[in-house]
Amino acid sequence: MDKARKKNIKRIIALVCACAVVVLLAAMPLIAKQDPEEDGPKASILSGTTSTGSINTELIGGGTLAEEDAVTIDLPSAVKLKEFLVSNGDAVTEGTAIATVDRVTVMTAISQVQETLEYLSEQIEEASDTDSEETVTALAGGIVKILYAEEGDSVQSVMLEHGALAVLSLDGLMAVDIETESTLSVGTAVTVTLSDGTAVSGKISSNLAGEMTVTMEDDGYPVEDKVQVAAEDGTAIGSGELYIYSPWNATAYAGTVDSIKVNVGDKLSTGKTLMKLSDVGYSAAYRQLIGQRQEYEQLMLELFKMYQTETIAAPCDGVVSGIDKDSVQLLCANGQGYTISFLANSPNGDDETLYSNYVGKVTAVANNGWVMNVNPQAIPIADYLDLSGVSLDETLMTQTVLHTQTDISIFTLTEGAWTPVDRATIGIGDILLFAADSQGNLVWSVLLQKAQQPENPGNPAGPGGSTQPGTPTDPTTPTMPGGTTTPSTPSIPGGSGGFPSGGMGGSFPTGGMTPQEPEFELYGLDMAQIAAVTPQETMTLDITIDELDISALQVGMTAQVKIDALGGEKYTATITEIGNTGTNNGGNSKYTVELTMDRAENMLSGMNATATLVLSTASDVLTIPADALVEDGNQTVVYTGFDEETETLLNPVIVKVGNSDGETVEILEGLTIGQTYYYAYYDTLEISFTPDFGRGGFFGR
């Protein structure tokens, strides 16, 4: 019986195992079918109804933030600084003193600028009295091809209509541009047939990217004539209009054409007169002088401000940069001592000085200088604000010299302040002190004593009491200590005419004065940059825009800028500059657009940013989500039905779309307001799915 029980148990176990195997085999297809669905992308069916709304057409560009351009602080090169009051990296506000200036060098500049202004005023007055007639001349040789202007024409009208009064051909060539697929090489001979049937020889000068340029010798061929171009074997290449290959435009901007001096076809040399104009108003020289004087007037205002404040100030709020503590504009550098010193209280802080000082008396005045009797003994001066100890003894002034150096400034000390002196007021009997550097070059002069006015009213006197040139009391005797006058062209007797020991180093040359007045030299407008201030109020962002979109932008348009490093927060920016030169990339040009925005806290140069510009807005239009669109071949469809049992999208409707902002799309045709639509939404981007339109939907089974 035990054996029988064991046998039955074995049979039951075998039966259970067999059943388990059968069940497992039956379930395997279902498992295999379900696993891919569970591992694949999950799709949700979304729905909505069409409604009206607004859609923006946008441009998006990215770049990095940058600070505003720094504003430079410039100084006339002749003006010197005493010290910088700020350092690189300091934050300053507009008007903050950046450095102190040396007041004496500012006064020197003021004096020289004033002389320049007076000279320019004289020149302007002369130019305003000149004949207002002008000529138009050829700036280069060539052939007259076009005469737009005629006698009696208004210059301004001709220029507005044609952009030129006449056009010359500089190289005697005509050209035509042709769009062609021909691969003929540069230099290949071709035949050009004019509109009247005349055939002439030409050659290919360029053939690039489907555009060919053909040139030909000009024989009076008309501009804009329609021509045909063919290869030597007669194969047509293309057609186009003739133009001047190397033109030069003759221009003017005011007046009336008084006379024409050339004809079309004339061959001109450089400088040849093409036409004469009348009633042009002030001449070009006059206008140039006016412009120059305005520059010097502006400089004079800046110098006066420096003189009054003894500082140069920050032009705006921002951070300072560019300061050089060893700048050549400084009077001293790194404690190495003064490199230059003009009328300082004490040039180097003790009883010595870098200058040699000489005292002399003017004995004659001429157009180009003075004759002087000078004390040959150099005088040491520790403090130029105290000249009471300087000897004015004329018996010590034993050396006769001629002074013709006009580029040094003269000052007088009045109540402790230095005042520039007009050199034209220096006359006979005036006593001056001259300072010379170690190389013997004069650097400035001080008027120590003014001569008394002459008592004899019959003797004409110049400014300051000087006898006028050409009216000496004795035409043969040079001035000696004691006061006799010297003729306007004296010959200096004896001596070198200069100071001993190289004191004046040629500043007082030997020989007689000449009445020829040297040409006036304008005060130099060269400026030296001493520092810069970078404003911190705004930031800029440069983005790149395609040539097809650039025409839609204009300065003043606003944009929304998102900055990644600041949590994606958006800021409003304004277009402040649009580049007018594109960079070609693969046949498509790109243009740079500058955006400017207020600087927010934590904005730093170099941060990545994305700008969105709204080009247009379509309002009250029928809209649906862009995700609801499905491409079916060459058509775009939207599903308007859905079967929940089979999970199948139904009833595709062909639609015509309009504007889109990337998320929403405008429906022009196919749907009506309030209509329901359905579309599939996937929770993963890793999907490759092609709808089976033949079975009516996405999930047809």
Image (cartoon, helix red, strand yellow):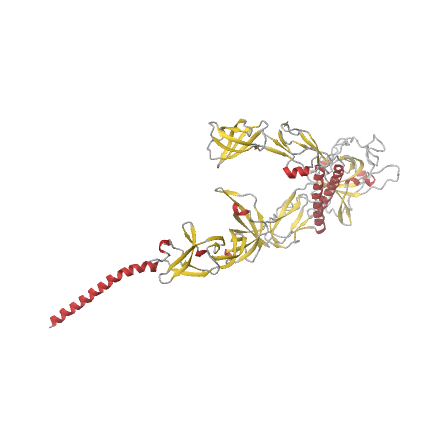
In the image, 54: left or right of 629? right
Residue 503: percent from left, percent from top: 72, 37
Taking the spot 20% from the left edge, 67% from the top edge, the residue there is 16
Which sits in the foreground, 346 or 542? 542
State left or right for residue 498 relative to residue 624.
right
Residue 196 in sight from this viewpoint: yes
Vertically, is 243 above or below 292? above
What is the x, y in percent for residue 620? Answer: 53, 57
Q: In which quarter of the image is residue 114?
A: top right
The N terminus sits in image quarter: bottom left
Residue under the image location 48 percent in, 36 percent down:
210
- The image position of residue 590, as x and y in percent, is 52, 45
**Residue 188: x percent and y percent?**
49, 28
| In-front residue for pair 300/62 | 62
Quarter containing the C terminus = bottom left
Q: Does 76 sit left or right of 692 as displayed?
A: right
Whether residue 503 can be seen here: no
